[in-house]
Image: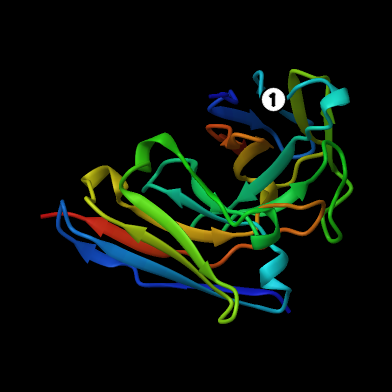
Amino acid sequence: SYELTQPPSVSVSPGQTARITCSGDALPPKYETKFAYWYQQKSGRAPALVIYEDSKRPSGIPERFSGSNSGTVATLTISGAQVEDEADYYCYSTDSSGVFFGGGTKLTVL
Amino acid sequence: EVQLVESGGGLVKPGGSLRLSCAASGFTFSNAWMHWVRQAPGKGLEWVGRIKRKIDGGTTDLAAPVRGRFSISRDDSKKMLYLQMNSLKTDDTAVYYCTTLPVGVNDNWGQGTLVTVSS
């Protein structure tokens, strides 16, 4: 089965850019049309989608959230991180055999 | 408004069984592949399994840690999703979420139900 690897923690000061990576062979090249998705989870709540299909932002998600996918590494970028962005972030991908989550990254904005 | 509401969680002894339910509303349930995802206390998200819609065969896929012990079923007429959990282990202690997972931008999760496996 695939594994998606994320750094356990990332720490930035307010206003700085936070980058969270997700690497693994569950993010195949574009011709296989598999995408990376990103969730934000705050304590005690269900996860909320912040990026879908590599780089698209759902309605209501601030423009400071962006995503990219090089083929084997997906990156969530928060440009000008705010204190309210402090949360756990998970990447997610899927193929015909199942569904895969990264281990999660705790973002601290302090 | 899309709603997913889980129920059936609780305290169960190791080796016991529990059935979780998820009531769906606000979307065409029969068209959706449905998933269960769990999260152990202080840990990350773990996919448990999925059930495809009937026109795609209605088959299930289960993650390796629960294969042979858990099963997933659905009742499209009632818009209900189920997770039957047998031979429960302490490692199965988690909040269990019912979710559609994203299809494009459409992504819906329930509030979760806590399952505690302890003697």
Q: In this view, does A100 lie to the left or right of B22?
A: right
- What residue lies at 78% left-to-right and 35% top-to-bottom? A35
The residue that appears at 60% across and 26% down in the rendered structure is A4
Q: What element carries label 1?
A: strand
What's the colour scheme?
A: rainbow
Residue type at the position of mark 1: Thr
Q: In which quarter of the image is residue B105?
A: bottom right
Q: Is residue B93 above or below residue A68?
A: below
Q: Is B106 on the left-hand or right-hand side of B24?
A: right
- Quarter of the view holding residue A23: top right
Q: Residues within 10 Å of mark 1 (few under 14, many from 20)?
A: many
Residue A80 located left or right of residue B67? right
Q: Mark 1 lies on which chain?
A: A
Question: Where residue A20 appears, x then y in whole percent?
Answer: 69, 29
Task: Please tell me which residue is depicted at 83% across the width and 41% down the height of the picture.
Answer: A53
- Identify the residue position indicated by label 1 in the image: A21
Residue B72 at x, y percent in the picture = 45, 58
Residue B26, image quadrant = bottom right
Q: From where the camera sits, is residue A79 visible?
A: no
